[in-house]
Each structure stands twice: as C-alpha cells, then as structure tokens.
C-alpha cells in the first residue's frame, strides 16, 4: 500500500552502525535509485548537542532518506525529530531493536520492547513535533518472549500513538549472553509473525527485516508484506540490492563496472574536498562478491586506498585486474 511520505518503502536498506554513512548511502542510491535508505542510529542527545553536519549531513541524491534515532526520553526525541525534519529528512525511525550492552545501559534499543507505554509516549511526542512520518523498527520480543499477542500489542500501541509504519526484524533479541552479531544470527527467524501481523492489520504498512539475502527470497516476502529491508546482504553483496531493484521496477540491469563508474563524480568531488579515498572504498569492497577477480578487487582497494594521494586511478587498476581475471575464466 502507499502511505503519504513513505515512498520507496517497497525496498529499504537497513540502518547499520559504522556502515551506512553518507558515502555508503550514495553508493546504495546508485545501486537502487528508488529504495528507501536509513542512516546509522544516532542518539537523540547527539542530534541535539553534537556536530550536526557530521551526524546529519547528507547528499541530496540520498533521498528518500530516513534518520534512525535512539533514545527513550520523549522530549529529547521530539526535539531531535524536529531537527531532522529541518535538515530535510523524509522520515524519523525509532530504534527498538538494537540489543547491545551499551544501548541497554542507555535504556534504548531492544529493551524498550518491555516498555510499550514509554515507547508510545516517545512516538506520540515525535509525531506531534513533525510533519514527516514517524516509524518504529522492532524485534518480535526479547529473551524468551514467545507470545505473538504480546508482540502485536506492542505494535498496536505504537500505531495508536501515531507510528506510520513498523519495520519488523523477525527474530527475538537476547539482552544477555549474545553479542550484537550473534543476535543477528542465532535467534530463529519467524517470518510468519510478520505475515500474521499484516494479515490481521491490512492497513498497517509492514516492512520485513532479517536474513533476507537473495532476490528470490525478497520477492517472496514482498508478496505477503509491504516491503523488505536488506541489511548485511546489501553491504557484503551490494549487487543483490541492484538486482532486486531491477526486478521490481523493470529498470535496466547494469554491470558492476558501470555502477562503479557512476560513483566516479562523487568520489572525485569528495577527494577534492580533502577526504581520504579509504572512507569511500571500504563500502565498495563487496561489489564483485562471488565474481572472478572479486578477491583481487578487494585486495587492491584495501591495500591502496589508505595511501596518500590515492584516487580514481586505484579503482581503474582494480577494475583492470578484475577484467583480466574474468576474461581468463570466460
């Protein structure tokens, strides 16, 4: 379904700490021109008191772009949401899914699923503060929770408070005993809960996250839900993101090399401004994942991008080696 202000939710790229910075997002926008992109999670207090250009700055090409906020103080979240709207973000998303110890210590992230009333206060405060959509990203529950009705009641509470969409990472979060990485892999996926939520609440936009790694899997989920959100797959094998966008929209499927060349103007502009190449190329390493020459492509960029003066010529070198190895295989 279509919801005002939520264009692009059919295909989303998840907020990923230390990964989905502005350079990564420009690359993902080239791969998927119509997808909805999300920032790394930023705490509301950092938005209010921190370096806003560093934390919130983005290239206009990244739109539609959502800012994911962390926090549990309604007034602070409302203020941060207003700032995000003023900066031009298309959506504000509240993180109720991160299980890290640091996040728990700050009383936000997945532990908030145990406090649905507080989350609803936060959502309502943000909704009252901005005209852009306020959305929630959550898990199915925490620790040994195994009650669909409890999960659905949490979602209902946030929708009643004004949440325009829910992104469901379809597994539990374990608050003790598992690392954030293990929390993305060990708790079993239960896609049927997201399907049931949508079936029971057909007017609620539901986007699915968690374990989606192929075009076929994403398309199967799209038959049941309003959208999918790719995370690690979009980062480690970014061509999957491009292939899924092409399958959904009918746009031409470009080669990996053509997609990389589209990054050249952005890369050269950032280098001209003084940015080191390594800050961009770290997001490009997976472009030739699983392809002949892919390992050499990664190696050349990893070893060369940190060197003083490294520029587009290094990427040309990596492409040339990749072409040569692909030709040998052919």
Image (cartoon, rainbow, N blue to C red):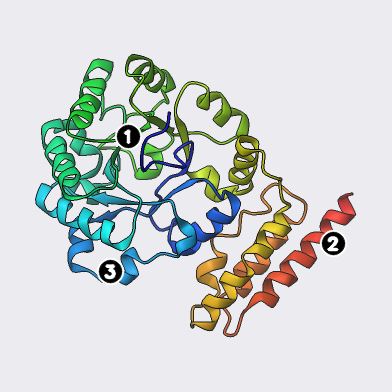
**Which image quadrant: the N terminus?**
top left
Residue wearing tag 3:
52
Name the foreground residue: 102 vs 82.
82
Q: Residues within 10 Å of mark 2 (few under 14, many from 20)?
A: few
Residue wearing tag 2:
324
Comes first in the chain, label 1 or label 2? 1
Q: How far apart are marks 1 and 3 (CA)?
A: 26 Å
Comes first in the chain, label 2 or label 3? 3
Q: Residues within 10 Å of mark 1 (few under 14, many from 20)?
A: many
Residue wearing tag 1:
165
Residue 185: give x, y in percent of width and height.
Answer: 44, 35
Q: Distance between the residues labelled 2 and 3?
A: 44 Å
Name the foreground residue: 118 vs 310.
118
Q: Identify the element where label 3 is drawn.
A: helix
Residue 33: give x, y in percent of width and height.
Answer: 56, 50
Q: From this view, report whether residue 301 is shown above or below residue 125.
A: below
Q: Nearer the viewer, mark 1 or mark 2?
A: 1
């Amino acid at each position: 379904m279509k919801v005002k202000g939520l264009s692009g939710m059919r295909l989303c790229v998840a907020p990923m700490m230390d990964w989905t910075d502005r350079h990564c997002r420009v690359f993902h926008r080239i791969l998927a021109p119509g997808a909805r992109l999300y920032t790394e999670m930023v705490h509301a207090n950092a938005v209010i008191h921190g370096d806003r250009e560093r934390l919130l700055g983005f290239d206009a090409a990244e739109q539609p772009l959502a800012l994911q906020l962390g926090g549990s103080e309604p007034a602070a979240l409302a203020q941060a949401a207003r700032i995000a709207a003023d900066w031009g973000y298309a959506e504000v998303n509240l993180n109720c899914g991160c299980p890290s110890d640091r996040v728990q210590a700050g009383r936000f992230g997945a532990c908030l699923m145990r406090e649905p009333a507080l989350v609803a206060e936060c959502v309502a405060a943000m909704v009252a503060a901005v005209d852009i959509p306020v959305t929630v990203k959550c898990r199915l529950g925490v620790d040994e929770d195994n009650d669909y009705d409890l999960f659905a009641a949490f979602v209902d509470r946030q929708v009643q408070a004004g949440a325009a969409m829910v992104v469901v990472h379809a597994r539990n979060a374990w608050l003790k005993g598992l690392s954030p990485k293990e929390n993305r892999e060990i708790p079993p996926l239960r896609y049927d809960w997201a399907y049931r939520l949508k079936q029971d609440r057909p007017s609620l936009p539901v986007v699915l996250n968690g374990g989606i790694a192929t075009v076929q899997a994403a398309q199967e989920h799209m038959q049941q839900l309003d959208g999918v959100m790719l995370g690690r797959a979009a980062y480690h094998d970014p061509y999957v993101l491009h292939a899924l966008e092409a399958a959904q929209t009918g746009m031409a499927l470009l080669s990996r090399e053509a997609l990389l060349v589209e990054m050249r103007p952005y890369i050269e502009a950032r280098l001209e401004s003084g940015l080191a190449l390594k800050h961009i190329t770290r997001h490009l390493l997976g472009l030739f994942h699983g392809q002949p020459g892919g390992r050499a492509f990664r190696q050349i960029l990893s070893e060369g991008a940190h060197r003083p003066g490294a520029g587009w010529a290094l990427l040309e070198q990596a492409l040339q080696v990749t072409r040569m190895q692909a030709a040998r295989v052919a």
